[in-house]
Amino acid sequence: MTLRGAGHSCDGQTVTAGELLVTYAPDAAAAQVRDLGQGLFEVPAGMSWHRLERYLHHRGRAAPVLPNYLHMSVGGTLSVGGAGVDSARYGMQVDHVERIQLIDGTGSSRWCSRHDHPELFRFALGGLGMVGLIERVVLRTLPHHRYIHVHHARHATLTELAEHTEQIAQRDDVDIYRASLRRGRLASITGWRSSESTRCHAEKCMTLPNLPLAGDIDVAETHAPASDQVQLWTDYVVPAGRFAPMLAAVEALLHREPLNRVHMMLYILILRRPLDATPFAFIPVRTAPVSIGLGVYTSFDKDPAVAAAIRAVFRGLLERCCDLGGRPYLYGANDLDDSLANRLYGAELVRLAQLRSSHRLEHVNAHLPLVRAARVADPGAKRHPQDWEYEGAGNRPI
Ligand SMILES: Cc1cc2nc3c(=O)[nH]c(=O)nc-3n(C[C@H](O)[C@H](O)[C@H](O)COP(=O)(O)OP(=O)(O)OC[C@H]3O[C@@H](n4cnc5c(N)ncnc54)[C@H](O)[C@@H]3O)c2cc1C
């Protein structure tokens, strides 16, 4: 059985020839939201961020962090981590989850939090549905600020952009940040949320209303790609202080085959997590208090040779990211073989295999590379028929 929210992860995570359980119900879900008081809201996992944010704004509240595209499910985004322009102050979306209702492989459900079933909580958020189905979520919210005061900047080179981003990452007075390379233009925005419309004397200062529902800083291509188009996206997250070499690794490839032949965009976010953040097992931030994410988004006409060449480029970048102490964002296209998975997640993989076994989840999302790596990492784990497909007929388990 494969679990799917809105199906926006980019590497077949929610594609299956078997049974599919789709939770995305953006329109039906609003009636099921419960205001628990003290800024806490209980939300069905199938709701979209768009509907939730509208609901919250009507009550003077807002999610601390939103993705730049809002028509994705709450449960699906929390199952990868969730980041956005507000991550510069508030870290990842999973950092603002009070508790989750998780259903295991027998159909039993339990509430998990930092105090109740803390290990399931730590593996479920950012965990690609590998330890069960998130059915409901209790989120912490913030007062909604109507305005955002934004400084736009242009950058002449990627080196300059890397320096600028590192400087902003050192500041703790910034509410929002993002930078991008798009259509040859290098630009960044730095911003501060406010209840009033204010201006300052900085050049390129603007006050924008009610982001992100207004869409002013929405950079995602919101339309589905045409059927003859492929989108291969991925993000690498490295600790602050190590961003320049990561960006340099991408820059070295920009004007060479195959990246020079495809439409490409780079997207950069700062992630400053709370000091007491939970060490979620598989989110892209390891332990660094401040990290910088680099999204590499390619789109091109369907061509297996180009796709293979892009994947080879991504694999090299993933190795570089690991060398720099970073991690990939698991919603994207990352060729994780068992040894790289082991290098990245080590003992968490063994524990993942044990949790899946004890909660009877062997049949759920079993196609994911991390699940396979977990079975290999845990010597006590039962082999799964899908391992044979991966290992080939000549390499059957004994
Ligand atoms: C246009 C676009 C813009 C994006 N922008 C951002 C962004 O700004 N910030 C960001 O962080 N990410 C962004 N992403 C990535 C996005 O967060 C992930 O693709 C996320 O998975 C999308 O949610 P979904 O509902 O589509 O999840 P799906 O792709 O459906 O599922 C993702 C994973 O979670 C599992 N899953 C789904 N629902 C549940 C559930 N209820 N319980 C347990 N497991 C579940 C699935 O099995 C799968 O492994 C973007 C992606 C796209 C395509």
Image (spheres, grey):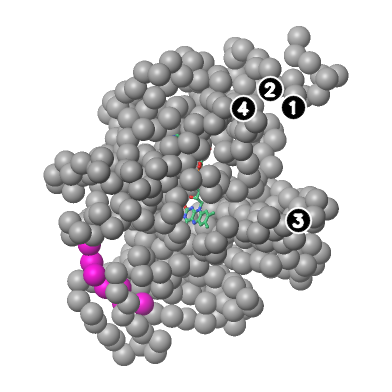
Q: Are marks 3 and 2 in contact (CB under 8 Å)?
A: no
Quarter of the image that includes the N terminus: top right
Q: Nearer the viewer, mark 3 or mark 2?
A: 3
Q: Residue furthest front?
A: 28
What's the residue type where badge 1 is placed? Tyr
Inter-mark Cα distance, 3 to 2: 28 Å
Inter-mark Cα distance, 3 to 1: 25 Å
Badge 2 is on which residue? 386
What's the residue type where badge 3 is placed? Lys
Q: Which mark is residue 390?
A: 1
N-terminal-most mark, 1 or 4: 4
Q: Which mark is residue 18?
A: 4
Badge 3 is on which residue? 302
Which stretch is magenta?
Answer: 144-150
- Judge whether 334 appears above or below 55 on screen: above
Please provide percent x and percent y for residue 92: 40, 50
- Judge whether 376 appears above or below 123 on screen: above
Q: Which residue occupies 29% across, 74% down?
A: 209
Q: Is residue 244 left or right of residue 397?
A: left
Q: Nearer the viewer, mark 4 or mark 2?
A: 4
Q: Quadrant of residue 114?
A: top left
135 part of magenta stretch: no
Q: Is residue 144 left or right of residue 321?
A: left
The residue carrying pointer 4 sits among few (fewer than 14), some (14 to 19) or many (20 or more) residues within 10 Å by Cα, namely few
Inter-mark Cα distance, 3 to 4: 25 Å
Q: Quadrant of residue 296?
A: bottom right
N-terminal-most mark, 4 or 2: 4
Inter-mark Cα distance, 4 to 2: 12 Å
N-terminal-most mark, 3 or 4: 4
N-terminal-most mark, 3 or 2: 3
